[in-house]
Image (cartoon, helix red, strand yellow):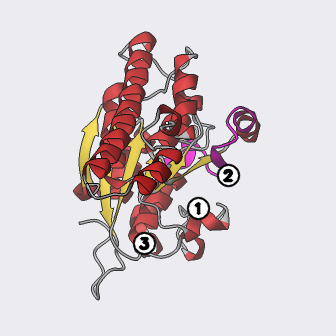
Amino acid sequence: MRSNAKPQSPSPFNTKLILICSFFLLFLLLVFGTTSSTFSTQQRRPPSASIAESQVSNSTPCPSLPSCTKAPPSLATALIHYATTNTTPQQTFKEISVSARVIETKSPCNFLVFGLGHDSLMWAALNHGGRTVFLEEDKAWIDQMKQKFPGLESYHVEYSTKVHQSDALLETGTKEESCRVVSDPRSSKCELAHKGFPSEIYDVEWDLIMVDAPTGFHDEAAGRMNAIYTAGLMARNREEGETDVFVHDVNRAVEDKFSKAFLCEGYLREQQGLLRHFTIPSHRAGSARLPFCP
């Protein structure tokens, strides 16, 4: 995310080039897929179609014409932005690919992202047709991004924790029984549950959650303790199915320890670079509740 920039192994030019190519290929697939579908429909047209019907058909704009095969607004905006900026996402290509594969299988879906950053347009474009929401601690940054990209849905959130409190919070979270009870975060008695998000954030069942904020690289920063725990609670509290949760910057102590403790090593599916991918099942489905960690 924006506030946690760090050196990346690939050069900015290479990452930028890869992203542009990826979006361009996606656009080509969309165009050719539409054209192919239209062609197949025309091929199945009965040979007995009347001349009048043919004339009516010819007077209607054909979906296969270039004027009809527009790129989705989210994709077009992302293409232009990443093609004209030297600022690229803080995640590496391999890290982004982990999340992109999951988005490809689940989109359009509900995607919650902790943090509003230079990769936000990319996530919204990859989840075209779905709902992608960003939670950001820096209100001034939200205002700046909204002026430039009004299509991004973001909300300002505040955190009362500090990174230097993480050890005490970890001990509380692993020892207090209230932190092992699966419930709506708003009614949870666990100190780690964040109760200050906009109400609609709690009312949505999120299919994917990305934790790449708040700031966590110095002792006085908010840290991601609440974010990681609450993401896990939201995933367990859904009616049925699974939630894919991604945590970035797992080289740091908070992200490492809290993701293992509250998203659970038993639910860990993959780690690529500084990104971990967990798949957490609903703990409400069926008559028997699952243990907090398998």
State the residue in front, 150 or 274. Answer: 150
Three-letter code, disc 2: Val
Instruction: Give the residue at mark 2.
Output: 157
Three-letter code, disc 3: Arg
For mark 1, does the 10 Å Cα neighbourhood hold few (<14), some (14 to 19), or many (20 or more) residues? many
Instruction: Give the residue at mark 1.
Output: 194
**Distance in Å between CA atoms under marks 2 and 1:** 10 Å
150 in the magenta segment? yes
Instruction: Give the residue at mark 3.
Output: 238
For mark 2, does the 10 Å Cα neighbourhood hold few (<14), some (14 to 19), or many (20 or more) residues? some
Q: Residue furthest front?
A: 51
**Distance in Å between CA atoms under marks 3 and 1:** 17 Å
Q: Position of residue 245 (x, y in %)?
A: 38, 53
239 in the magenta segment? no
Answer yes or no: is residue 100 visible.
no
Residue at the image point whose x is 28% and y is 73% from the top: 291
Disc nearer the start of the sequence (3/1) = 1
Q: Position of residue 190 (x, y in %)?
A: 52, 69
Range covered by the magenta-colored residues: 145-168
